[in-house]
Amino acid sequence: MKITLRSFADFREIIGAREQELSLPEGETVGGFLKGLREVHPRLQGKLFDASGKIKPYILILKNGKNIESLQNLDTIIAADDVISVFPPVAGG
């Protein structure tokens, strides 16, 4: 199935594109997708995950505009044509 990955700031630089279409197996979860993404882009490991392998608390992951924390978190199932957005922490002043 095809999905769209949107990445921002540091993640866009690591992945090499702001938006890209990817193929995933049916029934893939957000957690499985992110694990595969970090295998392709090893620099994501330290940016996305803490030492125990959990997503860092200040990373925002959206599925079709909804925070995965309000869904099933990393167990959220991705469907065809979904848009997964990955935002790094934002600092401001």
Image (cartoon, rainbow, N blue to C red):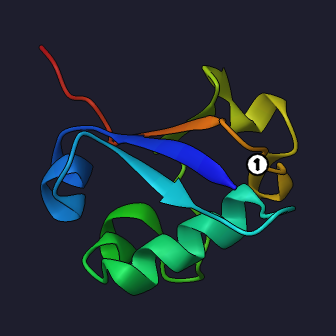
In the image, residue 89 lies at what x, y percent? 32, 38
In the image, residue 14 lies at what x, y percent? 18, 63
Q: On the rendered structure, is 15 left or right of 31?
A: left
Number of labels in the image equals 1
Residue plotted at (66% across, 28% down): 67
Quarter residue 61 falls in: top right
Q: Mark yes or no: residue 58 visible.
A: no
Residue 81 against residue 41 in the figure, above or below:
above
Which element carries disc 1, helix, strand or loop? loop
Residue 14 against residue 19 in the figure, above or below:
below
In the image, residue 71 lies at what x, y percent? 84, 34
Residue plotted at (78% across, 47% down): 73
Task: Determine the residue located farthest toward the top in the rendered image.
Answer: 93
Residue plotted at (61% across, 50% down): 2
Residue 33 vs residue 80, the one in the foreground: 80
Look at label 1 and name its amino acid: Ile
Q: Which residue is mark 1?
A: 78
Residue 37 vs residue 87, the one in the foreground: 37
Residue 35 against residue 75 in the figure, above or below:
below
Residue 70 against residue 68 in the figure, above or below:
above
Q: On the rendered structure, is 93 left or right of 47?
A: left
Task: Determine the residue located farthest toward the front in the rendered image.
Answer: 1
Q: Quadrant of the C terminus?
A: top left
Q: On the rendered structure, is 8 left or right of 34?
A: left
Q: On the rendered structure, is 70 left or right of 82?
A: right
In the image, residue 90 lies at what x, y percent? 26, 30
Quarter residue 69 falls in: top right
Q: Quadrant of the N terminus?
A: bottom right
Q: Mark yes or no: residue 13 visible.
A: yes
Q: Residues within 10 Å of mark 1 (few under 14, many from 20)?
A: many
Residue plotted at (59% across, 82% down): 52
